[in-house]
Image (cartoon, rainbow, N blue to C red):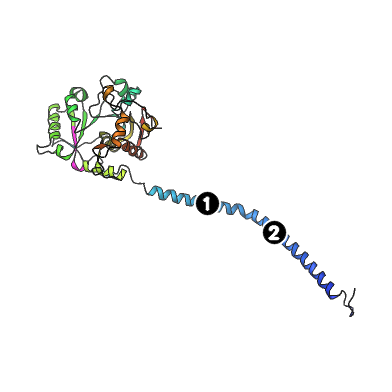
Amino acid sequence: MFSEDGSGLMPARRLLLIGLVAGFALFVSFAVYVYQGELTTQLWKPALDAALEKVHLRRLSNQNSSSTSEDDSPHPMPFNVTDPLSGYVNVIKDREPLKMHCNVCAMVSSSGQVLNHEAGAEIDKAECVIRMNDAPVTGFEKHVGTRTTIRVASHTSFQFVNKKKADLLVKNKGLTLVAWGPDHSMKTDGKGRIFNGLSKLAKELGDDIDVYMLTPQRMAYADKVFEKETGKPRQSSGSFLSTGWFTMILATEMCDQIKVYGMISDEYCKKYPQDETRYHYYASAGNGHECDLYKRHENGRKNSHRFITEKTVFSRWAAFHNVSFHSPSWH
């Protein structure tokens, strides 16, 4: 067992023993290392997770801020920031332009949808009640209310409003009539047929009502808003703007809160394809269904109202203004 010189184990055996001792020491060191590593990991892992969570939240916040910043401008874009109602001028030259502000406005649609609800009493509670074109009150009071503060009329509907002025205008002392139309019909040089009619009406009714019209700049602005909201130029896309478009713009400029009654959402006709609600509540049942008309116009190539597109835009505006939709609800 010993070497010839008395130094102990033979060289081969000595090497084997050294190897075993070294291997055992290495094993023990590795085990301690692993244990300490797991322990250390348990200690710093929560801190790491928290840090990673902060980075993740910061990234999401930046993404949200980025997406929001792309659409943080007001909708609709303002005509005049310092004087929102500029561009609505009195048809009688020496009278003041439109100046009106309402805390709560009830904007009443002309849709047959109003007949499915009895919101008249609720509508009358609003400080200002806005109606469109020749939509009547008489005979429909429990559905549409009794009061009218503002009536917005198109150049094509003015003749009907004028014809029924005793019921639509004279009954409401102090009523405001706002009319819109293309420039050629609103010329103030004697050649504007609609302007001439508006001017005659205003003089005839005297102080009972105030009659306003949109300036050419206002009309161009309405087109510009349509293009900004839809990405399509109004004229080249073959689109007509509705009275509802002009009325909603006016409401966002003069009302702190807007309650819209009887207007359907852009998804309504998809959800209820068999719906047979009439287009106007005051028209006979045989004058066409609202959804049929909406779909036909939406798909028209020219000279068509984009009613459904307008409703999509209105839902976007609701996020920037205090707008809610009732009878039916959009929620």
Residue pointed to by mark 1: 54
Q: Which residue range is magenta in the image? A: 211-217
On screen, residue 53 above or below 201: below
Q: Residue 117: name its quadrant.
A: top left
Q: Locate the C terminus and report the quarter of the image it occupies.
A: top left
Q: Position of residue 185 (x, y in %)?
A: 15, 37
Residue pointed to by mark 2: 34
Q: Which mark is residue 81?
A: none
- Whole-Å distance between the Cαs marked 2 and 1? 29 Å
Residue furthest to the bottom:
5
Q: Locate the N terminus and report the quarter of the image it occupies.
A: bottom right
Q: Position of residue 328 (x, y in %)?
A: 37, 28
Task: Give the residue at x 70% y 59%.
Answer: 34
Q: Position of residue 170 (x, y in %)?
A: 19, 24
- Helix, strand or loop status at disc 2: helix
Q: Nearer the viewer, mark 2 or mark 1?
A: 2
Q: Is residue 167 magenta?
A: no
Would residue 230 be visible to someone looking at this image? yes
Total numbered labels placed on residues in the image: 2
Question: Between disc 2 and disc 1, whose residue precedes?
Answer: 2
Task: Give the residue at x 73% y 63%.
Answer: 29
The kind of residue tagged 2 is: Val
Horizontal arrangement in the rendering, residue 23 relative to residue 92 (left or right): right
On screen, residue 139 above or below 54: above
